[in-house]
Amino acid sequence: MFRGNFTAKLDDKGRVIFPAKFREVLATTGSDEICITNFKTEGLPCLDVYPQAKWLALEEKLRQPTERTSRVIKYLQNFYLPGVQECQVDRQGRILLANRLRDFAGLGHEVVFVGLVDKLRIWSDQNWKAVFDKGEEDDLSDDPEVISLLGITG
């Protein structure tokens, strides 16, 4: 499982060290290949990163007939799926982020990798701070539904 967050430096060629803890998780999948695509949340751009097997499972799931709204289908067909870049972690533990993905996510010299259990996100440091701060403001710790969902007892 991808847990925690890690800051890393992006070099001039667009390479960044994939965090060691996340490389360990990736190793359990039997592959050092990942799929990276554009995403937006809280109105801010970032990159979604999947181990290749998880991405392939997502593609297979999307092939199954379902009742998706046209808005969801358009989002997937016009933005999420075509934005994907297949990438391999090199021997030095780095990944190369395509220019278009770096530009989309507004990545500067410092990036933040954020674990989301079965995938992770790459953020610019300023966008991650904004999203994290918003999460702190939305404090749901006193919401019984959230407490129940998380299995936290008071």
Image (cartoon, grey):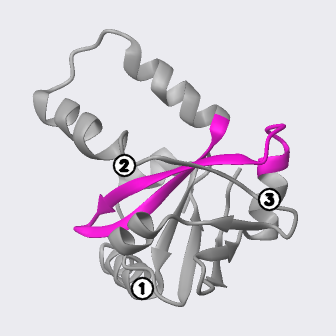
For numbered disc 2, what is the local secondary structure?
helix
The amino acid type of the residue labelled 1 equals Lys
For numbered disc 3, what is the local secondary structure?
helix
Q: Where in the figure is residue 39, as x and y percent of width and height?
A: 35, 56
The amino acid type of the residue labelled 3 equals Arg
Residue found at the very far left of the displayed protein = 70
Residue that numbered label 1 is attached to: 129
Name which residue lies at 42% across and 64% down. 101
**Closer to the camera: disc 3 or disc 1?**
3
Residue 41: give its label: none
Q: Is residue 141 visible?
A: no
Q: Nearer the viewer, residue 20 or 88?
A: 88
Residue that numbered label 2 is attached to: 145
Neighbour tally class for label 3: few under 14, some 14-19, many 20 plus, Cα within 10 Å: some
For numbered disc 1, what is the local secondary structure?
helix
Neighbour tally class for label 1: few under 14, some 14-19, many 20 plus, Cα within 10 Å: few
User: Is residue 86 depicted above or below 12 in this figure?
Assistant: above
Task: Give the Cα distance between marks 3 and 1.
Answer: 24 Å
Q: Are marks 3 and 1 in contact (CB under 8 Å)?
A: no
Q: Where in the figure is residue 131, as x and y percent of width and height?
A: 36, 76
